[in-house]
Amino acid sequence: MTAPRAGERSKARAARRRMAPVEAQMRVLMSGTEFGDADTARTMERELVERLEEDRPLRIYCGYDPTSVDLHLGHTLTMRKLRQFQDFGHEVTFLIGNFTGLVGDPSDKNHERPMLTPEQLAENATTYTQQAFRVLDGESTTVRYNADWLGRLGFADVLRLCSKFTVAQFLKRENFARRYERGDAIHLNEFMYALMQAYDALHLDTDVQVGGTDQLFNLMAGRTLQQDAGKRPQVVLTLPILVGTDGHARMSKSTGNTIGIDDSPSDIYGKVMSLPDSAIVDYFTLVTPLAPDEVDAVRTALDGGTLRPMEAKKRLAWEVTASLYSAEEAAAAQAYFESTIQRRETPEEMPEHPLDGRAALTRVLTEAGLATSNGEVRRLVAQGAVALNGEPVEDFTIEVAPGDEIRVGRHRFLRLVEDAR
């Protein structure tokens, strides 16, 4: 007998009980959402209420293109929204865009994205579900790959999809408009991305699609195709773009302001503690499992002065870390932060890096993964972010030796030891 798939198990569980009251679901599901205008927000809210009132498990999905190996907290905004739907008994599909990823989503780009090969996408996708299941309930998540249906479309199928949209619609998009005004190249395959994502929604017959605010055009295109096919258009829920650890720019690996899902508990805790106070409430809302009422209590306490930002940030760092690891590991990360950062103690235990004699600091930090390049080492030293044996490093060209202890930033340490080989 064949075992039921994850989505089927979720559906069976949900069918055995009534859904939560619509008002309770809406309070949670609309929390943190953001739309381009008030009319869109009202429409989506009304349509979501109508579907929830049907008292059945809804079909929810979000797509993720495996254009890099590692996921960061910015990716978890949509995952947490999916998890909220799961907790209410709805069916969630985690869609890996191994076909859309060939183009790459141009929504947040002011330039053409380099195309990846199927081999690169397959390699990147191998760790995606493992990382995503730190947030999602893996037991009740259906994983799909959109190459399974997009790869089977013929040229006539693509022409029919193209006939549903105009070039003017695409050129109204802010990123395309800027590039068009500058005279920069806009290739046809970039227009295809929205069509492919729209077809995903049609093929999956979704009730709700979750995405970022920068993807609103793509998600609304899915409604267009569904309506054209005589189906009820999906509800669209969009979430804002998460700022990085600098508190200003979009969280992005290229910017260097990310908090990775697979970062160590101490790194996650320390990076959250480095956030500016202005980001505290948004992070509580978007990247923790706290209920809206709990977030409101934090906001009220901060505004009223009964909760200091440092204490709020400690709770935030604990919540984020515990949501990706365990409560015990979050507590250990907090203790590590308080001793090494607040009391400026050097930890007794720290990662070790074997070294055969003296070596350049740049080589050691890049080999140990504390910097991605010699240029980054130079930048870290210039910012005063590197210390050797407790003293700030002023010359990035210095050499280090076994026995030395290096500190990068406020919470990363490295002890150099003799290479035993």
Image (cartoon, helix red, strand yellow):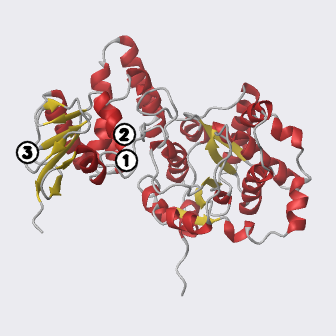
Question: Image height check: is 3 above or below 52?
Answer: below
Location of residue 420 (image quadrant):
bottom left
Mark sitting earlier along the chain (2/3): 3
The secondary structure type at the circle numbered 2 is helix
**Which residue in the protein does label 2 denote?**
376
**Residue contact at pointers 1 and 3, CB within 8 angstroms:** no
In the rendered structure, which amino acid carries the disc numbered 3?
Glu
- Residue at coordinates 66% horizontally, 46% vertically from top-left? 52
Disc nearest the viewer among 1 and 3: 1
Outermost residue on the bottom side: it is: 1
Q: Position of residue 259 (x, y in %)?
A: 39, 42
Mark sitting earlier along the chain (1/3): 3
**Which residue in the protein does label 3 denote?**
348
Left or right: where 405 falls relative to 246: left
- Residue at coordinates 26% horizontally, 27% vertically from top-left? 384
**Which residue in the protein does label 1 denote?**
372
In the rendered structure, which amino acid carries the disc numbered 1?
Thr
**Residue contact at pointers 1 and 2, CB within 8 angstroms:** yes
- Residue nearest the observer in this picture, 382 or 191: 382
Location of residue 171 (image quadrant):
top right
The secondary structure type at the circle numbered 1 is loop
Q: Is residue 318 visible?
A: no
Q: Position of residue 217 (x, y in %)?
A: 75, 41
- Residue nearest the observer in this picture, 420 or 85: 420
Q: Position of residue 98 (x, y in %)?
A: 62, 63
Question: Image height check: is 294 above or below 89?
Answer: above
* CA distance separating discs 2 and 3: 27 Å
- Residue nearest the observer in this picture, 24 or 188: 188
